[in-house]
Image (cartoon, rainbow, N blue to C red):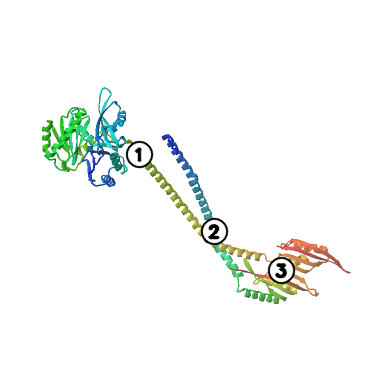
């Protein structure tokens, strides 16, 4: 084994170099990564705080939104079950047809569509004069029924009279709470 | 210059003695019995001793008794002290029954002659004995400044006590169980001899033993031609000096005798009181130092290593502390982040509910706003068509495209109808899909189809 004999000055230089090296390693292996980790945490704190503050601000308006929804639910909310809903619409349609002097040839509830809203589509085949047809449409679109007419086909009958045959799909919208 | 009062410790087979004189007030003196104790026990005693006395054990003068050392005289051809040491080292094996490496020695120059020769006194102690004392002492984490011989303490006491510098004195120092005979002047110690005294009073029978020891000491002194014969005898000690001893000595040697008793109330327990008093404020360079340099170097190296280890340990603890504090800081930050995330998760739930509300409201209001109000639409269509256009088919598809088929008398009516639709705010992309002209016997009619997108 080679044994180094160092003078005091050499020992001092070796110690200082060793300490500097230790310091350098400490800075690059411990201090800097630690600082980076800390700044990462600080950044994430700032982001979280900002996000939370924004959320809090949005939540402050919750009352307004709730009120708007409540008023919509009051007007457009469910009355009862799906069957009751369909039944109610059909009754209303029949009443409107009677009022407008329109003959309903066929009425057929279609599958209910549920996404953000609940849609109750009903396919109708009707017959009547153009004037009555317009009146019928007016009645079913006016409140309280306020149905959407999504698909409409009106065709003059070939019987030579002023009769119009129509097929349409009406939909009632409901808000799901 | 203010006197320096040395801290002096003496370890014998029987006692551990500490002594330190003070500028004012009573000196500090403490003695403890170590009979039957092994070295580990002595070390423990010593540590307790220093703690009780509240003294720093560093830099003490350790006194070993005369009986542990050999004294030899040589005339060497040099005046340089280091050279004299080297010469003595070469000859030491020849004058003692030990190998050179088995002893520790120091020397003191007694006189020089005109030819460049020095008469030196060499104090030789078995290395084993010195190492034992050294080990006992350094285990207390301190290093003695000097290990010296009690004879020099007796001589130094004499130097302080007696104003006559050149007169040769014989000092008979008697302690509890031992003592020594020193022959010295105020300038030098020339010879000394250990005494093994009987316990209790020195009976008349024992005076013969003492006289024989005195004779042997004087013979050796004369034989070595160290100086003139003593002119006075001093009896010192702490065990109490027999009254008739002075008379016997005067009668035997025809010399004046002076007795100095250090014992006082502590008679019989003081150990080598004269030596301790002598070293208390003396210039130690006049004495010998029996600490081997290799032991000092080893000790200093060990101390340096310990200091480095302690420093490294302290740095390590500091680093661990810093890391610990840092980790705690990071932990707290992470905990705060976790708290924020937990709060956010709770808020997010509420926000999701709000989002759902908003989506429902938007969907509902959108659906309501996008409804085609047929009453208005038909009014626009009827107004735009005018009396000359008859529609026989109206179709609204799922994608809100309105297509109308009808018949007109002429093209101008169709154009007018189309323009009317285009002007309306209800429709966009009004397009004439086709026009078919049909001619009958008495009239002409144009069949057409118009499509448009409902806004």
Residue A85 is situated, as x and y percent measured from the top left of the image, at 63, 74
What residue lies at 38% left-to-right and 41% top-to-bottom?
B305
Residue B175 is situated, as x and y percent measured from the top left of the image, at 18, 40
Residue B38 seen in the figure: yes
Quadrant in which the C terminus of chain A is drawn = bottom right
- Residue on which disc 1 sits: B298
Dot 2: within a 10 Å radius of its alpha carbon, few (fewer than 14), some, or many (20 or more) residues? some
Q: Callout 2: helix, strand or loop?
A: helix
**Subunit that carries the residue with mark 3:** A
Residue B232 is situated, as x and y percent measured from the top left of the image, at 15, 31
In the image, farthest residue toward the top: B114
Dot 3: within a 10 Å radius of its alpha carbon, few (fewer than 14), some, or many (20 or more) residues? some
Side (left or right) of B379 relative to B254: right
- First reached walking from the N terminus: tag 2 or tag 3: 2
What residue lies at 75% left-to-right and 61% top-to-bottom?
B430
Measure the C-alpha gap from mark 2 to mark 3: 41 Å
- Residue on which disc 3 sits: A151
Q: Callout 3: helix, strand or loop?
A: strand
């Amino acid at each position: 084994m080679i044994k180094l004999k160092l003078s005091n000055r050499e020992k001092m230089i070796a110690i200082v170099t060793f300490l500097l090296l230790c310091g350098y390693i400490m800075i690059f292996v411990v201090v800097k990564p630690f600082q980076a980790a800390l700044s990462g945490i600080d950044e994430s704190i700032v982001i979280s705080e900002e996000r939370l503050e924004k959320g809090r601000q949005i939540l402050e308006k919750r009352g307004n939104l709730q009120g708007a929804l409540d008023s919509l639910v009051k007007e457009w909310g469910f009355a009862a079950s799906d069957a009751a809903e369909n039944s109610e619409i059909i009754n209303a349609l029949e009443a409107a047809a009677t009022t407008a002097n329109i003959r309903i040839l066929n009425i057929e509830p279609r599958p209910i569509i549920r996404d953000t809203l609940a849609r109750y589509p009903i396919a109708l085949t009707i017959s009547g004069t153009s004037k009555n047809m317009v009146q019928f449409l007016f009645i079913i679109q006016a409140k309280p029924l306020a149905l959407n007419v999504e698909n409409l086909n009106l065709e003059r009958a070939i019987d030579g009279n002023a009769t119009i045959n129509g097929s349409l799909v009406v939909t009632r919208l409901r808000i799901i709470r | 210059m203010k006197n320096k009062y040395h801290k002096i410790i003496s370890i014998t087979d029987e006692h551990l003695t500490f002594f330190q004189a003070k500028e004012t007030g009573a000196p500090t003196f403490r003695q403890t019995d170590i009979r039957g104790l092994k070295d580990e026990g002595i070390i423990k005693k010593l540590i307790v001793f220093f703690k009780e006395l509240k003294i720093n054990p560093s830099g003490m003068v350790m006194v070993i008794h005369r009986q542990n050392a050999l004294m030899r005289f040589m005339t060497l051809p040099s005046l340089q002290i280091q050279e004299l040491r080297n010469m003595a080292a070469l000859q030491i094996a020849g004058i003692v029954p030990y190998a050179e490496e088995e002893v520790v020695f120091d020397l003191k120059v007694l006189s020089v002659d005109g030819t460049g020769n020095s008469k030196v006194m060499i104090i030789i102690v078995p290395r084993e004995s010195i190492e034992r004392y050294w080990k006992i002492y350094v285990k207390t984490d301190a290093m003695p400044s000097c290990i010296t011989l009690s004879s020099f303490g007796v001589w130094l006491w004499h130097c302080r006590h007696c104003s006559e510098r050149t007169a040769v004195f014989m000092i008979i120092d008697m302690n509890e169980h031992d003592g020594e005979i020193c022959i010295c002047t105020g300038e030098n110690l020339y010879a000394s001899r250990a005494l093994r005294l009987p316990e209790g009073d020195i009976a008349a029978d024992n005076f013969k033993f003492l006289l024989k020891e005195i004779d042997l000491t004087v013979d050796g002194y004369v034989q070595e031609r160290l100086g003139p014969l003593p002119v006075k005898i001093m009896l010192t000690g702490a065990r109490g000096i027999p009254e008739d001893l002075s008379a016997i000595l005067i009668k035997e040697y025809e010399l004046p005798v002076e007795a100095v008793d250090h014992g006082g109330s502590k008679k019989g327990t003081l150990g080598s009181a004269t030596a301790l008093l002598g070293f208390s404020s003396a210039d130690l360079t006049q004495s010998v130092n029996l600490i081997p340099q290799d032991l000092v170097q080893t000790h200093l190296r060990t101390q340096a290593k310990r200091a480095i280890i302690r420093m490294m340990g302290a740095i390590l603890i500091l680093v661990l502390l810093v890391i610990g504090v840092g980790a705690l800081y990071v932990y707290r930050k992470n905990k705060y982040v976790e708290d924020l995330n937990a709060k956010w998760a709770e808020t997010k739930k509420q926000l999701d509910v709000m989002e759902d509300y908003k989506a429902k409201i938007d969907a509902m209001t959108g659906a309501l706003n996008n409804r085609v109000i047929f009453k208005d639409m038909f009014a626009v269509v009827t107004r735009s068509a005018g009396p000359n256009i008859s529609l026989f088919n109206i179709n609204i598809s799922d994608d809100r495209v309105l297509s109308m088929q009808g018949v007109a008398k002429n093209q101008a009516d169709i154009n007018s109808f189309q323009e009317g639709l285009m002007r309306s705010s209800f429709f966009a992309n009004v397009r004439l899909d086709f026009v078919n002209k049909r001619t009958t016997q008495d009239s002409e009619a144009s069949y057409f189809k118009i499509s448009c997108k409902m806004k």
